[in-house]
Image (cartoon, grey):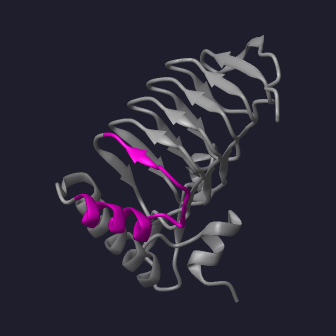
Amino acid sequence: MLTEHEKLLAGQDYDYRDPELQGMIAQGRQRLTVINTSADAEKRAAAIQDFFGKVGQRLTINGQFSAVYGQHIQVGDDVFINGNCTFQDSNRITLGDRVIIAPDTKLYCGGHSLDATQRFGTRADGTRYLVTTTKPITIGNDVWIGGNVTIIGGVTIGNNVVVGAGAVVTKDVPDNAVVGGVPARLIKPLPALDKE
């Protein structure tokens, strides 16, 4: 039998109020408070290392940052996350190397049924709960995400991609592309990067 955390990561219906999940959320909030408020560089760096599942070299978080669990987020080298970004990491979020994320960007792994009758379930004790399913988000190397972008769970963004400001990314994005709009669509291809 899977734990609620295992169900969450598997994209199955899970109970958000599970004590293990609530403990993880509480721990994440404590670490985020340090990340978002501490003027002590060493204390802040330690909180970042403890909060994220994996952190590459030279991660910069510029301004307020919000996430739910933290430990589901893996970040490569030379990643820059600007202010007021929200990572709803109810599944895995993976950022490659040299990723730039502009302000007000939102990554949402969780979702709910289109069928309104399927959005709430009933536990054995008769209490009701919100039915949520999750999908991971993967962002490749050398990606620039513009301001106020929303990326939905299940999306993979390839390498060498620019996502235009205000886009809503609901489908995978191939390598070497500029996308934008609502929903995001291909605007133009980019030349492949020289790999030395």
Q: Position of residue 28 (x, y in %)?
A: 36, 68
Is 44 magenta? The answer is: yes
Can you see residue 111? no
Quarter of the picture containing the C terminus is top right
In which quarter of the view is residue 163 placed? top right
The answer to whether residue 87 is left or right of residue 93 is left
Q: Nearer the viewer, residue 122 or 48?
A: 48
Query: What residue occupies the far top of the structure in this picture?
Result: 188
Give the residue drawn at x 53%, y 45%. 108
Q: Nearer the viewer, residue 100 or 114?
A: 100
Is 188 magenta? The answer is: no
Residue 186, placed above or below residue 69: above
Q: Position of residue 71 (x, y in %)?
A: 50, 67
Q: Position of residue 63 (x, y in %)?
A: 28, 40
Give the residue drawn at x 79%, y 26%. 193
Can you see residue 2? yes
Give the residue drawn at x 63%, y 30%. 169
Residue 51, placed above or below residue 39: below
Q: Nearer the viewer, residue 83 or 173?
A: 83
The answer to whether residue 173 is left or right of residue 58 is right
Give the residue drawn at x 46%, y 85%. 125
Q: Which residues are magenta?
A: 41-62
In which quarter of the view is residue 69 placed? bottom left
The answer to whether residue 150 is left or right of residue 49 is right
